[in-house]
Image (tube, grey):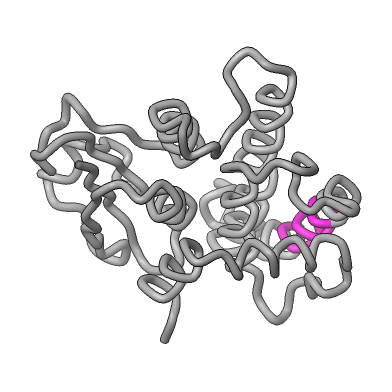
Amino acid sequence: MYHLYCARRSAAMAAHAALEELGVPFALHFIDVESPRPPEYLRLNPHGKVPTLVVGDDPADPSHALYQGAAILRYLADRHPEGKLAPPPGSFERGRCDQFLFYMAEALQPAYMMHFYPERFTAEPDQAPGVDAKGPDLVAAIWKHLDRVVGAGPWLLGAAFSVSDLYMYMLSIWNQPHHVPLSDFPDLSRALARIGARPAVRRMYKAVCAD
């Protein structure tokens, strides 16, 4: 059994989609990210962010809690190799899968966060507008790079679907009308449409994104 702590349209979406893809039993626990985190959640994740995954029947067991979305995805892929959500550990293709996963976690996700929460990236309040303006520029450059990587695809790794595709789809949901339209990147857009059409991803989207 898995317990996933999440919020609507949050960084938990990729882990949620992975659980759906694997068809394993899980429960969602929604966190109000606009309110102070309760002590029982901070015992699971001292940073108070989502996602947090608890492995086992007890959703409050901090000894079996994992946080950081990329780490959760790798853990699920390794624990359920039959789901084929990542190439075998030690293979070169696994290295490429991790490369894209970490690139998005370290570059694309922070670029969005710079735009959504610019005050977190500067000690000077009057510099926040500049941080805010820089975020979308970085977002556009990274999506342009990923468009080149995907190419004919159909996935980031070519023929093999992976957790990196789920992470990429999650971040695409964060794109706003005033950001660069992802339709400007034809290969990327086609890949995102394929990911979004997967039944597991559609179930995730309906649960946490549909209005």
Q: Residue at x 74, y 49 (%)?
A: 155
Residue in the picture at 57% in, 52% down: 166
Q: Is residue 165 above or below residue 79?
A: below
Q: At 21% from the left edge and 58% from the top edge, which residue is drawn?
A: 29
Q: Is residue 96 rendered to the left or right of residue 6?
A: right
Magenta range is 135-143
Asked if residue 15 lies left or right of residue 101, the reply is left
Nearest the camera: 64 or 179?
64
User: Residue at the location (90% across, 52% down)?
Assistant: 151
Residues 74 and 131: in front is 74
User: What is the x, y in percent for residue 63?
Assistant: 17, 24
Which image quadrant is residue 103 in?
A: top right
Q: Position of residue 169 (x, y in %)?
A: 62, 59
Q: Residue furthest front?
A: 82
Say if 44 sits above or below 15 in the image: above
Find residue 28 and report its image quarter. Answer: bottom left
Q: Is residue 140 magenta?
A: yes
* Position of the C terminus by quadrant: bottom left
Magenta stretch prevailing secondary structure: helix
Magenta residue check for 201:
no
Q: Is residue 184 left or right of residue 37?
A: right
